[in-house]
Image: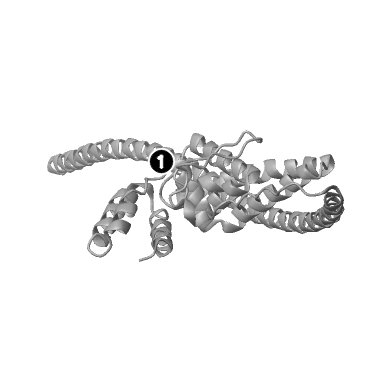
Amino acid sequence: MSQEAADTDLAGIAVELYALLPKDFTAARNERAKELGKTDKELSKQVRGLPKPSTAAWLVNMLAAHRRDEIDGIIGLGAAMREAQDELDPQQLRELSDQRHRLLAAIAKQGRKLAKELGHPVSETIAADVEQTLRAAMADPAAAAAVASGLLTDSLSSNGLDPVELDGKVAVPEAIGEAPPTAPKTKQKPVDELAKRRTERAARTDREKQRRAEEAERRRQKAQADVDKAARRLAETEAGEQEAEAEVEQISVKRDELAAELAELKSRTRTLERSITAVDTEAAAAEDRLEEATRSAAEARRGLQRARKALEDQD
């Protein structure tokens, strides 16, 4: 197998492994390496050497896989900002910086929500590392390619000036391409030829500036479209979240009302039970008095009969 084919196979395997939950990564990697050891020991060794991603890197990889539009929006906006910096356009830079702030905050929130949906919630600290990594992707095209690859092993950072450090941060560096080679130095030319070259170079520079300006405008428009799309999606999800919160609040209020009504009914029931007990006591006493009165009446009737008989006997 050629080195290029091996790298391609390794990248494909890495994409599968880095799409797993962190808790499942090590076992799955080792099992895959074990299987490959039967047919390709070199590739097996490379797979076994794939490092487990940090939690922040894992979440960035998941965003690249499940929230691709938002990641593309981040990368597109970063390209537009770098172009604006090259063109020294302060107005556009301010506008794009505001968009960057809003978009980064939105995608960091989306990241925590996605992690929860995938069964691996993350802390605010991890979300901050994710935002820092995406900010680095906006500052450096190589970092942007690393983020888009879904093969990060660790979070990234940028000081806004130097290239982002990617050494050891991408599982398969070959999967994100290489930097273009440096142009070779040329020998000294005669003065006339140098003047001609300078003229041609100036013309090429003008054409290149025009091309870059047109390309920057296209990237800016694409970035704006991506930002608008991401903003609409965020607005829709936030609206859904607000509706769900309102529904939960409404149900909670209804539950509290029913609970209060139930408590009132229980209190009323206890009062009625006490009243029934009192009436039962009064009824028992009344029955005792009735029984006594019945005995007294019977005794009086017998006394009356005796008195009548005594009167008859005297006659």
Residue at the (64%, 45%) spot, across then down: 138
Residue at the (24%, 57%) spot, across then down: 34
Q: Is residue 105 above or below residue 202?
A: above
Q: Amino acid at mark 1?
A: Lys
Residue at the (39%, 40%) spot, across then down: 272
In the image, 205 versus 196, the foreground residue is: 196
In the image, 256 versus 119, the foreground residue is: 119
Q: Position of residue 78 (x, y in %)?
A: 68, 47
Q: Position of residue 309 (x, y in %)?
A: 14, 43
Residue at the (84%, 41%) spot, across then down: 91
Q: Position of residue 238 (x, y in %)?
A: 63, 50
Dot 1 surroundings within 10 Å: few (below 14), some, or many (20 or more)? few
Q: Pick out the residue farthest to the left.
A: 313
In the picture, which quadrant includes the C terminus?
top left
Q: Position of residue 234 (x, y in %)?
A: 64, 52
Disc 1 is placed on an element classified as helix
Q: Is residue 256 above or below residue 222?
A: above
Q: In the rendered image, which quarter is residue 313 located in?
A: top left
Which colouring convention does the figure follow? one colour
Q: Which residue is mark 1?
A: 266
In the image, 26 versus 210, the foreground residue is: 210
Q: Is residue 39 left or right of residue 265?
A: left
